[in-house]
Image (cartoon, rainbow, N blue to C red):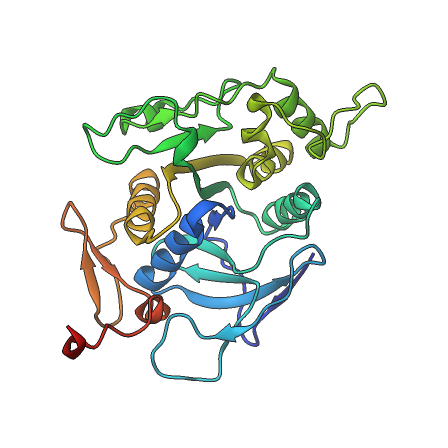
Amino acid sequence: MEFVLEEGKHLSESCSNLILPALSIGNVGQLAVDLLVSSTGAETVGYLDDQFVLPCVGNDAYRPSPRGDLALPLQAYESSSSGLTLIQQRSPVVKGMMVEYAKNLADFAAASGNKHVVVLSALDFGRLQRIDMSSGPQIYYLSSTSVDGTDDYCEQLGWKRLQEYNPAQRGWKYLSSLAEGDVGEENNFTFEDDLEEEDYYPSLPFAALFSCFKARGLKVTCLLCYCSEGDNMADAFNLADAACKFLRLNPDNVRGNPPLYFGDDGEKWIVPFSWMTVYGPPPDMSMF
């Protein structure tokens, strides 16, 4: 993986918290990163070129006025006021290469001096074992601060540890071995085999990122929510808000112009310009 800085830019040592998405159902992690980039006024500092990420190109996702800036598969942003580095991933990883991609990303984070990595992703609502909507959408987490994945601060926030995480289960053990480069000949399990139910979660992108960052000695926390495919903007607001709470950021400290979205607690978000055309123009009401 090669990191290319924009002319005149440099990585700031004060931006030690890294937020990035793991591709998932509904693209919720990517949408949440979009919100954070837009609302914190983060500036592009460069892009990452990795052989395992499929190429793509598009127009600037955040500004209504064209400046000739392109959106690339992996771009890095920094918000000095928030102490954040953000990476946005806009295209999928080559099939079967997720762990290698995660290793490259972990190497980049370690070399860049990132102290804490926050991975944002979503899970399939159809696999949720117990549904409890009494307190609204639930945030689940997975942390490297303890062997069993628990974190005291996440518990204080009212979040639940991902119950399906079991470091002794064969899928998680195999993933950990891959991340550490210590897969013995006796381990003939792969994620290309017919997976059992318990192997589903360690086969997901967030699990590979979690294992590889952890293997590199970095503190990593995955923030997760269950959702279904469809209009997942509300899920993105929920996940972005969780990231702000976890890192003790204030989403009201935003720059730029409306459109603004006010969250459930009154916080302000700047909606990325690219979201304006997600579903096309409104219908012609004269036909009704």
- Looking at the picture, tell me which residue is in the foreground, 163 or 107: 163
Which residue is painted at 60% across and 34% down in the image?
203
Q: Position of residue 120 (x, y in %)?
A: 44, 44
Residue appearing at x 45%, y 43% in the figure: 121
Vertical comparison of 118 with 267: above or below? above
Query: Residue 206: where, in percent of width, then height?
Result: 53, 39
Q: Position of residue 46 (x, y in %)?
A: 56, 67
Q: Is residue 17 left or right of residue 97?
A: left
Q: For residue 100, which quarter of the picture?
A: top right
Q: Residue furthest right?
A: 185
Total marks in image: 0
Looking at the rendered image, the quarter that the C terminus falls into is bottom left
Q: Is residue 263 left or right of residue 70?
A: left
Residue 187 quadrant:
top right
Q: For this rendering, which residue is in front, 73 or 194? A: 194
Q: Looking at this view, is 201 or 176 the one in front?
A: 201
Residue 163 falls left or right of residue 257:
right
Q: Which residue corresponds to the image point at 58% horizontal and 19% vertical from the top-left?
A: 167
Q: Is residue 245 above or below residue 151?
A: below
Q: Quadrant of the N terminus?
A: bottom right
In the depicted view, which residue is nearer to us: 17 or 171?
171
Identity of the residue furthest to the front in this view: 288
Horizontal and vertical percent for residue 212? 63, 37
Q: What residue is rendered at 47% in x and 68% in y?
A: 44
